[in-house]
Image: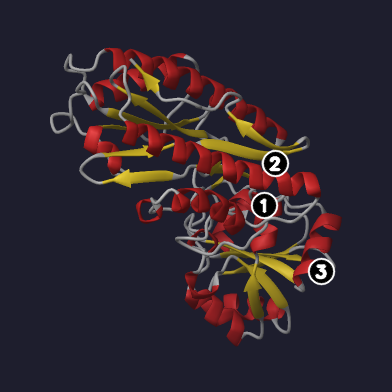
């Protein structure tokens, strides 16, 4: 999946770099794995230079040359560390190279290259700059097949969430536990062709106020009448494709308390404000960065007086990793100034958490496809699912 030469040349020229240097070792850089479509062992350091001009160059260990049999450029083998340094020096000296780094670890999902590697390359004469624009364009963009996989998964998850939440809130007070609902959700989604890598989050009542709560059998809560119910679920057609990631909310009762309704509508409106910010920018042909969409959602929650209860970013990148390497909707945990561009996907999931009471999060996904930024599922939640 080495990028198209013309597109890569344009991106590198914009970044002011002579090349994109990809580093892979023991799976620590998913960007390199994605771009190079690495298969087989990667137990030794691998460097691949994708230059603005000329053919690619790989520096690879002699016992791991097999995966490079069809490499479209020169391969420089090494075994001893002296050979590695000599080969690298011949490739990088005097060049300005983009790599997966983030100064001061500002965006951890982009900071994939160890400091020692950067030190070595600088000693060998290279100047290292962040590769964020290349990552978004060439590593995080979805293929047509991945887009279809995601859309399929999104509609299945939405159907399952609606049905299982409606069933659960009808059973409030009958002893239904968080892990029992979790098991029913997994069974229903798997029966319709989806695969999970980890179990969904199910939180009843006060547990819904813990954003990353994990229920455990024997220690989980039973659903009581009047409980808020949070269901956060993510799955895909296969473990190696783009997942869908959603959060749905229910209430185990007929009359929703005023405070719960206020928090729900605030979160929903914040979600929709971020969506509108992205769509409006796309329609106007105006660039928009991830932090700007976060600000749009956060502004709604702050105006409602819950700013200190929204304690995470508005959304994360989604690619083959559920929390991907592309731009995040974030001006809270980080200041992500990478642009949202055609091809990328991400979650939109503001939340308000009131410890000891309840929490509300509403999560949908967006993908910037050929028709502009689209929301999945097709019918996001607009009202609490209630008894």
Q: Residue furthest left?
A: 218
In the rendered image of this protein, does residue 103 appear above or below residue 365? Answer: below
Query: Which residue is tagged 1?
Result: 340
Sooner in the amino-acid sequence: mark 1 or mark 2: 1
Sooner in the amino-acid sequence: mark 3 or mark 2: 3
Which one is in front, 54 or 324? 324
Query: Which residue is tagged 3?
Result: 13
Q: Which quadrant of the rendered structure holds the C terminus?
A: top left
Task: Report the mark closest to the observer, 1 or 3.
Answer: 1
x, y (%) of residue 211?
33, 44
Q: Secondary structure at mark 2?
A: strand
x, y (%) of residue 176?
21, 18
Which one is in front, 313 or 24? 313
Callout 1: few (<14), some (14-19), or many (20+) C-alpha neighbours within 10 Å?
many
Callout 2: few (<14), some (14-19), or many (20+) C-alpha neighbours within 10 Å?
many
Give the image quarter of residue 263: top left
Give the image quarter of residue 225: top left
> Residues under labels 1 and 3: Cα distance?
19 Å
């Amino acid at each position: 999946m080495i990028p198209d030469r013309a597109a890569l040349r344009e991106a590198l020229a914009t970044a002011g770099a002579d090349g994109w240097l990809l580093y892979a070792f023991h799976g620590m850089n998913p960007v390199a794995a994605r771009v190079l479509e690495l298969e087989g062992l990667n137990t030794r350091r691998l460097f691949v230079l994708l230059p603005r001009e000329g053919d690619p160059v790989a520096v690879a260990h002699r016992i791991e040359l097999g995966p490079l049999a069809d490499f479209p450029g020169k391969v420089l083998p090494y075994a001893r560390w002296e050979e590695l340094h000599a080969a690298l020096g011949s490739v990088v000296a005097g060049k300005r190279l983009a790599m997966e780094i983030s100064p001061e670890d500002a965006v951890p999902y982009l900071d994939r290259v160890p400091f020692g590697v950067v030190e070595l390359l600088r000693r060998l004469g290279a100047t290292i700059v962040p590769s964020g624009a290349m990552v978004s364009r060439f590593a995080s963009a979805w293929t047509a097949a991945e887009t279809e996989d995601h859309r399929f998964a999104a509609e299945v998850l939405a159907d399952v969430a609606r049905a299982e939440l409606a069933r659960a809130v009808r059973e409030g007070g009958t002893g239904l536990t968080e892990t029992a609902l979790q098991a029913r959700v997994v069974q229903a989604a798997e029966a319709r062709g989806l695969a999970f890598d980890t179990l969904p989050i199910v939180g009843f009542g006060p547990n819904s106020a813990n954003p990353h709560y994990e229920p455990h059998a024997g220690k989980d809560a039973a659903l009581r009448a009047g409980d808020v119910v949070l269901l956060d679920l993510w799955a895909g057609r296969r473990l190696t494709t783009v997942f869908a990631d959603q959060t749905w909310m229910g209430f185990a009762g007929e009359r929703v308390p005023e405070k719960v309704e206020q928090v729900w509508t605030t979160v929903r409106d914040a979600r929709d404000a971020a969506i509108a910010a992205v769509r409006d920018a796309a329609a106007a042909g105006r660039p928009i960065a991830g932090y700007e969409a976060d600000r749009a959602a956060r502004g709604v929650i702050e105006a409602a007086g819950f700013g200190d209860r929204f304690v995470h970013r508005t959304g994360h990148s989604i690619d083959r990793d559920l929390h991907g390497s592309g731009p995040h909707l974030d001006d809270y945990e980080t200041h992500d100034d990478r642009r949202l561009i055609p091809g990328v996907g991400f979650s939109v999931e503001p939340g308000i958490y009131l410890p000891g009471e309840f929490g509300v999060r509403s999560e949908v996904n967006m993908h910037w496809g050929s028709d502009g930024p689209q929301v999945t599922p097709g019918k996001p939640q607009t009202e609490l699912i209630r008894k």
